Image: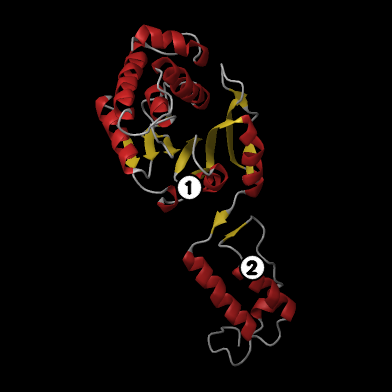
Amino acid sequence: MRAARIAELLEPFLAPSSANAALYQDISMYVDILLRWNARINLTAIRNPEEIVTRHFGESLFAATHLFPSTARVGTGDSPVRLADLGSGAGFPGLPIKLWASNLALTLIESNHKKAAFLSEVTRALTLTDVNIQNVRAETLPPTTFEVVTLRAVERFVGVLPVAARLVTRSGRLALLIASSQLDAARSTLPTFSWDPPLPIPHSKSRLLLVGGPNQEYKQVELNSHFIHFLEWLMDRVVASTEVKWETNARLSRFIKSKSRFRPNSLPVFPPEQLTKCSSRDTGCSHR
């Protein structure tokens, strides 16, 4: 497909003079590879090359221009922004975003082996660097790893949303390319996220870009296993004291049995005298 025609088709999705000839050449090569592979495996239901450009590349680059308005410096110093595209499939929106902001550290998460092989082929053909293809389920990846996580056209949308949110750093962003009918589901599924106003995708009646991140008021602090063990040990010591009220014991028990996360200022507060009074039978106590 001619690069000049691609430039015409993508004009509504990009700011004037924001792209360059190299971007359109890369997209032309990408489309050719996609059409060849799509004849063997189901990567996209769209077969028309021009519709592939507007529907897939246009939507992806629209997200790219809003997530990274300036591509001159994505990241700080030697630490590029880490972006994960969950359920990447044919590479949208992850790979077009990488073409837009080449110094991103991109991770494509795709559990299907054949689709992961396609992503590897496109990455090789376009000579892209700092692209990590994870042929695994997203649930197996460590949490709070990526500054940006993207999600588009995935099955079981409501079920996947918490998985995507789990990968976002506490100051990161989750970018959803969704239909307007999915807007309420996104907001209700992730109530601890703050969302920007949704942006309509050009030349679409119902497609939206929704960007949000963890709400500062509800950011959760991870408790590692060592701290949990310490709290369990502390509860044993407190329970051993005959002078501690049952109410205090119940409050601490409820906290320990809750999830291994807590909101700031949620630790139970105990009067100092309750923590210093110990039973004479407690040989580990220093307040005898």
Of residues 35 and 121, which is closer to you in this image?
Answer: 35
Instruction: Give the secondary structure at mark 2.
Output: helix
* Residue 13: % across, % down: 51, 16
Q: Which residue is painted at 53% across and 34% down in the image?
A: 175
Q: What residue does disc 2 label?
A: 255
| Quadrant of image for the N terminus | top left
In terms of image quadrants, where is residue 214? top right
In terms of image quadrants, where is residue 128? top left
Of residues 280 and 90, which is closer to you in this image?
Answer: 90
Amino acid type, mark 1: Thr
Q: Is residue 200 left or right of residue 25?
A: right
Classify 183 as above or below 58.
below
* Badge number at residue 103: none
Q: Marks 1 and 2, Cα distance to the nearest angstrom?
A: 23 Å
Classify 282 as above or below 128.
below
Q: Is residue 244 left or right of residue 157?
A: right
Q: Which residue is painted at 60% across and 84% down in the image?
A: 287
Classify 8 as above or below 111.
above
* Badge number at residue 144: 1
